Amino acid sequence: MTPHLTHSFAKHRGVRGVHFYDSSGCEFFQWDRVFGLIDKSRFPAQFGDKLVDTIANYDPDREFVAVSAGSGQVTIEIFRAETL
């Protein structure tokens, strides 16, 4: 996990949305903005459907949804905060 992704998780804990990241940075979009991108066909339909399902079914207080792109692949990841 990259430092900029970890920083974004800490900054946006409890906010429903997606952390879009690569090796050089991270940008957080709240869920309404992500839905706007999906509605404008910025993503293939199957990917958009999977992303909507993921955003709707995670706990933003304890989990984080991230999307990364690299080597010709785009992946949706869910990270869970460690509990003490």
Image (tube, rainbow, N blue to C red):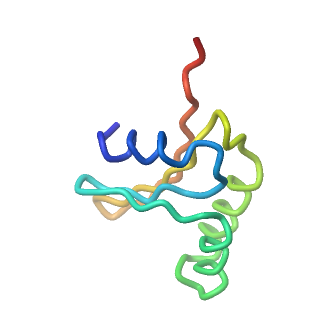
Q: Residue furthest front?
A: 11
Numbered circles on residues, count? 0
Q: Residue furthest left?
A: 24
Query: Could you say which quadrant of the image residue 48 lies in?
Result: bottom right
Q: Residue furthest top?
A: 84
- Residue 17 image point, x, y percent: 61, 58
The residue positioned 38% from the left and 42% from the top of the image is 7
- Residue 42 image point, x, y percent: 53, 82
Q: Quadrant of the N terminus?
A: top left
- Residue 75 image point, x, y percent: 47, 54
Q: Nearer the viewer, residue 32 or 73?
A: 32
Q: Quadrant of the C terminus?
A: top right
**In screen coordinates, is 1 left or right of 65?**
left
Vertical placement of residue 80 versus 11, above or below: above
**In screen coordinates, is 66 left or right of 1?**
right
- Residue 8 image point, x, y percent: 43, 48
The residue positioned 58% from the left and 31% from the top of the image is 80
Vertical placement of residue 71 versus 62, above or below: below
Vertical placement of residue 59 versus 17, above or below: above
Query: Could you say which quadrant of the image residue 25 lies in?
Result: bottom left
The residue positioned 65% from the left and 33% from the top of the image is 62
The residue positioned 48% from the left and 55% from the top of the image is 19
Q: Residue furthest bottom?
A: 40
